[in-house]
Image: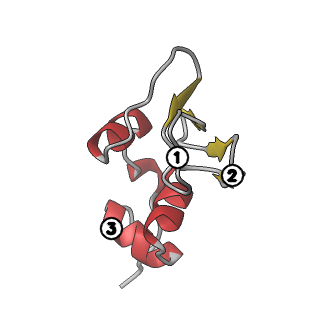
Amino acid sequence: MNTKFHKDRLPNPLEYFEQNGFPLVGQGEWRSAICPFHGDTKPSLRVRIETGAFRCLACGEKGGDLLAFHQKRFGMSFKDACIALGVWG
């Protein structure tokens, strides 16, 4: 059995963040949300809606795509995050 990562199956970032309790606000390519990586009270997490790339302007947490966010948010390995998001296999 040839198991691999299917990046094209990653969820839509807008839908993913909304469904996981992080509604994105604003307009344009980059939107804002409350950062889950520190005690945020104002939206300091910036998310690129095309890829899910993110960077917190307050704590500095960052990643290149939705998978990286899911890994960091839930403390998962790459493979476990892929399985959880349905992009492995």
The earlier-in-sequence mark between 3 and 2 is 2
The earlier-in-sequence mark between 2 and 1 is 1
Per the image, the residue denoted by label 1 is 35
- Circles 3, 2 touching at the beta carbon (< 8 Å): no
Amino acid type, residue under disc 2 in the picture:
Cys
Q: Residues within 10 Å of mark 1 (few under 14, many from 20)?
A: many
Per the image, the residue denoted by label 3 is 84
| Residue 81 appears left or right of 27 | left
> Residue placed at 61% from the left, 44% from the top?
54
The earlier-in-sequence mark between 3 and 1 is 1
Q: Position of residue 23 (x, y in %)?
A: 37, 33
Amino acid type, residue under disc 1 in the picture:
Cys
- Circles 3, 1 touching at the beta carbon (< 8 Å): no
> Residue placed at 52% from the left, 46% from the top?
35
Element at label 2: loop
In space, the residues marked 3 and 1 are separated at their CA atoms by 21 Å
Per the image, the residue denoted by label 2 is 59
- Circles 2, 1 touching at the beta carbon (< 8 Å): yes
In the picture, residue 55 is in which quadrant?
top right
Element at label 1: loop
